[in-house]
Image: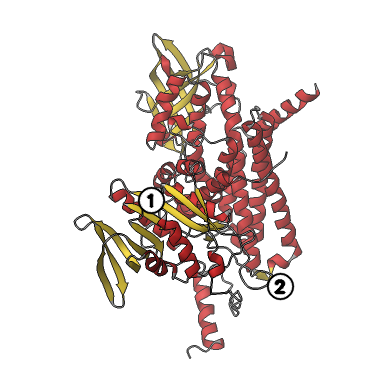
Amino acid sequence: MVDFSLTEEQLSLQELARKFARTEMAPHAAECDRAGRFPEEIYRKAWELGLMNLNVPTEFGGSGLALLEQTVIVEELARACAGMTTSIIANCLALEPILLGGTPEQQRKFLAPFCAEYHLASFCLTEPSGGSDAGAVKTRAKREGDEYVLDGEKCFITNGPHASLYTVFAATDPSARQKGISAFVVPRTTAGVTPGREEEKMGHRASSTSTVRFEGARIPADHRLGAEGEGFSIAMRTLDQTRTPIGALATGIAQAALDHAAAYSLQRHTFGKPIAEHQAIQFKLANMAQELHAARWLTWHAAWTIDHGAKGTLESSIAKCFASDAAMRIADEAIQVFGGYGYMKEYPVEKLLRDAKLAQIYEGSNEIQRIVIARELLRAYA
Amino acid sequence: MEIVVLIKPVPEPETKLRPTADGRAFDGEGVKFVLAGYDESAVEQALLLKESVAGSKVRAITAGPAPRSEEVLRAALALGCDMATWVEIPKGADLDPLASARILATAVHRYPHDLVLTGKQSLEDESGLVGPALGALLNVPDFGGVADLRYDEASGGLRFQRVVEGGNEALASPLPCVIALQQAWNDPRTAKLPNILKSRKMPIERIEGGHEPLLSQQRRVAFRLPAPRTGARMIDHTTPEEAAEKLVRILKEEARVFP
């Protein structure tokens, strides 16, 4: 049976996220964007309310939410500020490898502190020499007795300078390419771990992004997640889980763009009437609404598919790819509705375009998503 | 201390209300009802007292129709109330303040109550009568417009302030009593996500509202929206200076507010 209604429980989670987004995030969004400020006080509040470690099971003190609930929350947060949302949900991405590849003991040890206290974690996969080609990881992890020694550099790491824990993908057997990659949990306090300076970004400026360097960083062998060589699979399965919330983040940006454009069109007059009464503007709004709805339902459907036990690689790639492309087009049209004002930083819509752009790039670029979609699709015909 | 806090589902403050087809009430169809305004402050006050007096328990009570009543009680439980009671009143029953107070007094009587807290008035009807009527029906002291409420260990009663013309008065009351709180002088907390999930599984005691609705003396004969305001005008501008210049010209030349 198809049912698109949210339960009372889901509605109250949506309400919580909406309230937090409106009262805590939105008032600071423009200022953080302008200054490139990382508003840690807001992230702390998000943690206090339980909005941070959404995917961590309740037995470790997390929220233990299914993907559908996560998408509902992420969309509401991103309506207020996509950059802050990226930093708030980065823990879900960084901790997912521990959920997927960790032993019960590793899970207790590494996850519980994140729910007992405010901490940030970072997912370290991408390297300067290759993002989408995740199999070409150059960071080395050499076994020496009961330890691994890590050497290499990761880049575009969300919350990098602020994280207390990194989940790192490194080659234990470089000759085996994908099958030679292993996953590790690396505490920030490990000697030889150095986050680099914060990048100046086009959008998501309330989030923090940096390189993280590993120079002879020694970690105990029991910090490895899964078996040697299982790292690539853990990374890919992690992204299968976290791609859908990126679709939700893009949907949130798109919703904000439509909200601003529709409200402005009723208020702004040209040729003696509100521009909303001009068909040129109506058609724009109608197209924006169509794409927004499609983005949301694709995202919910991907979440629903995965929540019902399927892998959902096809569905989540479709959702992430479509929603982020749609968010770009919708933000673009919102600026057009605002005309000259839309191009000005004083108005909120140009930020949405800059923020939407990243959703097409991170957590698997949309080109990679299309490759994945085609591969999954053709498999059904082969 | 056994604290009872009385709450009422009210339309979400940003809702655009519409009259029903017969024009006698606002149309609740499709309207989201929430815990808001004075009642939110009352719940916050109940929780602050609970936290300051060891062993205290808070019960939230509401009287109203499904499903909105359950939703505000769940919201109160998510915020930290321990127990909840729903007095079921059929949808569309036109309760006047005295009938509401009678129904609530009957419900309060079922439970131990050292303190009954209410908001100053509901955000929708704004009669402000239920609190005082309840004091009379329960035969205990009642106070309205109360702020800065504290438990006084020495006397085992309460101390609080009331804003009166030209100043504040400090008052004390023994328990039990009924207190209607002034306004949102406290900063109501936000329910945490895990508590929202927990509150969905907590029991809500349901009791029948009985025949009190039939005793209502007051009838609402019409509900009208305020007449739309006209004459607002937006000033097109690119800089604040330009906006100010245009505004001054309009005030001088068109409105003739000053020469």
Q: Amino acid at mark 1?
A: Val
| Residue B108 image offset from top left, x and y in percent | 42, 57
Task: Tell whether A148 sits left or right of A66.
Answer: left
Instruction: In the rendered view, tell whether residue A208 sits above or below residue B137.
Output: above
Q: How many marks?
A: 2
| Residue A365 image offset from top left, x and y in percent | 62, 34
Within-10-Å neighbours for mark 1: few <14, some 14–19, many 20+:
many
* Type of colouring: secondary structure
Dot 1: element = strand
Task: Tell whether A226 sits left or right of A380.
Answer: left
Task: Tell whether B182 sits left or right of A205.
Answer: left
Quadrant for residue A306, please give it: top right
Q: Amino acid at mark 2?
A: Phe
Report whether residue A155 is seen.
no
Task: Tell whether A166 sits left or right of B224.
Answer: left
Q: Which residue position holds label 2?
A: A271
Residue B58's disc is 1
